Image: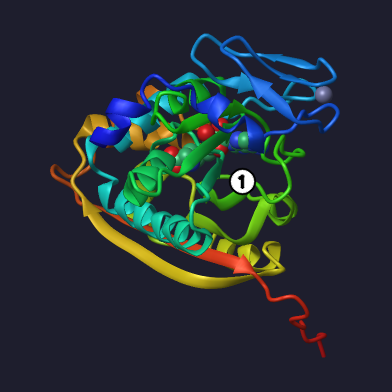
Amino acid sequence: MSEADAAGDAVADPLAGVADLLRCPVCGGTVAADRLAVRCGAAHTFDRARQGYASLLARPLKFHGDDAEMVGARGAVLASGLYDPLLRAVAAAGADVLSAVAAATGSRVPTAVDLGCGTGTYLAGVLEQAGASVRARGIGIDASKAAVRAAARAHPRVAALLGDAWAELPMADGAADLIMSVFAPRNAAAYRRVLAPGGAVMVVAPEPGHLAELVDGIGLLRVDERKNERLAGALSGFDEVRADTVRWAMRPTPEQMAAIVGMGPSARHLDSAEVRSRIARLPAGLTVSGAVAVRVFRRSAPGACVPAPG
Ligand SMILES: C[S@@+](CC[C@H](N)C(=O)[O-])C[C@H]1O[C@@H](n2cnc3c(N)ncnc32)[C@H](O)[C@@H]1O
Ligand SMILES: [Zn+2]
């Protein structure tokens, strides 16, 4: 955390600080936030958890996202430094978007929204990298209570909301200058409504070869090789303006390997005792590859024509 944040923001309430960007999920009205709840003018009230996040939901979630164990494993991996090259690349790409918005709009404070934010670590990195002069605000949304609990602590300017990335987002039209999807679900219709003119979407997704040594050695689920092809289709109406593939090498301890497995989709399919015994059979000091694409998209220019097939 920067000195300015430590001195200024630590006592402020990040959720109250983004209330102007939020909308009531029931009636769409503007809201205000206090320590106990978020309320709209029509008296729809959404209680806040002790940890600071709010559940701005029109109806209870049907899907509860990652469980506490998975979020804990993800937190441990991100805190270990193993993913630092990726954290740096995401922070740089996101901060570039926010800094450009701040430069173009003068005094307006830009906002980053991370859908499926997990622990909020990537979002916090973006805000921190954008710096104390930009003082960007962050909103982290996740379907997992364990995740939003962690995200609420990630940075003094990150507000955390329990929510569904597939549902109508409780946010005003054009409220986000940067929308992030980091190993998380993507919802292009929501991006189109919530993204401010001049804003950008950052999509971070594994490339083939990501964690290959663990995929082969432990039998993890494989990255779908056609994922990027599908992404291009799903983000119709957006043009890719930046693409960095981050490739790095990790030397995880057996415990860190177990955390890498535990934070991913294979955690739901593999028994943890079996994972440990498979890790024990891997060569000592195994180097594990990271390969992740960090891609930035902007709205296509109005009137840009898409050629008809054939
Ligand atoms: C693979 S984790 C990535 C978390 C974080 N972006 C990161 O990279 O550290 C996927 C996250 O998306 C959340 N998630 C899954 N489906 C969701 C949905 N429909 N709405 C909101 N969050 C969702 C999960 O709870 C989980 O925290
Ligand atoms: Zn309302």
Residue 266 in the image: x percent, y percent? 48, 37
**Picture layout, residue 208 above or below residue 134:** below
Q: Residue at point 52% right, 46% down? A: 112
Give the quarter of the figure containing the N terminus.
top left
Q: Quadrant of residue 78?
A: top left
Residue 226 in the image: x percent, y percent? 58, 65
Residue 30 as seen in the image, left or right of residue 152: right
**Picture layout, residue 26 above or below residue 230:** above
Q: Residue at point 40% right, 31% down? A: 262
Q: Residue at point 49% right, 27% down? A: 14
Q: Quadrant of residue 36?
A: top right
Identity, as a three-letter code, of the amino acid under mark 1: Pro
| Crowding near the residue tagged with mark 1, few <14, some 14–19, many ≥20 C-alpha atoms within 10 Å | few
Query: Label 1, on which residue?
Result: 185
Q: Is mark 1 within 8 Å of ligand 1?
A: yes
In-front residue for pair 49/13 = 13
Residue 192 as seen in the image, left or right of residue 277: right
Give the quarter of the figure containing the C terminus.
bottom right
In-front residue for pair 11/298 = 11
Displayed-image quarter of ligand 1: top right
Residue 265 visible somewhere in the drawing: no
